[in-house]
Image (cartoon, helix red, strand yellow):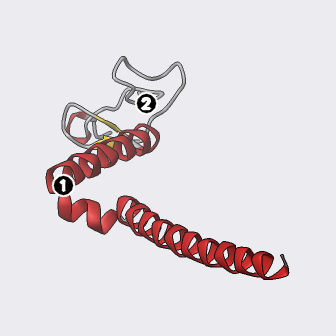
């Protein structure tokens, strides 16, 4: 009876080691798959058009987010800092407190 227990323990030990080796192989394979799935270099290589679209969308988002805080375009194409007060026209351009008179029209007295 003692010999039967020893043989059973050895069989269980072998099965445990075999199962452990299979699990380690499966975990290693899953780890490789996950690393490939989250590696941006691999994704760019596999799907360049999608990567380009994502980069363009990200750049547009950041540009819109920063552009709205830094400057507003004018009709002449220059960027002027945004002013949020009552002296701004409908395009958000700052209006001077007093009218600007061109230098050539000032009278010389």
Which numbered circle lies on residue 16? none
Q: Nearer the viewer, residue 86 or 35?
A: 35
Of pointers 1 and 2, the one earlier in the residue sequence = 1
Return the x and y of residue 32 as percentages of the image width and height: 40, 69
What residue is at 37 percent from the left and 65 percent from the top?
39
Q: Nearer the viewer, residue 40 or 93?
A: 40
- Give the secondary structure at mark 2: loop
Residue 34 found in image quarter: bottom left
Q: Residue furthest front?
A: 1
Q: Is residue 1 above or below residue 102?
A: below
> Label 1, on which residue?
47
Q: Which of label 1 and label 2 is nearer to you? A: 1
> Label 2, on which residue?
96
Return the x and y of residue 82 as percentages of the image width and height: 44, 35
- Give the secondary structure at mark 1: loop
Spatial CA distance of label 1 from label 2 is: 52 Å
Return the x and y of residue 45 as percentages of the image width and height: 19, 65
């Amino acid at each position: 009876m003692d010999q039967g227990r020893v043989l059973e323990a050895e069989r269980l030990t072998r099965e445990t080691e075999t199962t452990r080796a299979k699990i380690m192989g499966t975990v290693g394979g899953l780890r490789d798959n996950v690393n490939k799935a989250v590696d941006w270099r691999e994704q760019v290589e596999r799907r360049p058009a999608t990567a380009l679209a994502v980069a363009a969308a990200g750049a547009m988002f950041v540009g819109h987010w920063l552009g709205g805080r830094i400057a507003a375009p004018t009709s002449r194409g220059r960027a002027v800092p945004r002013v949020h007060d009552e002296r701004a026209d409908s395009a958000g351009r700052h209006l001077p407190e007093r009218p600007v008179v061109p230098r050539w029209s000032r009278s010389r007295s």
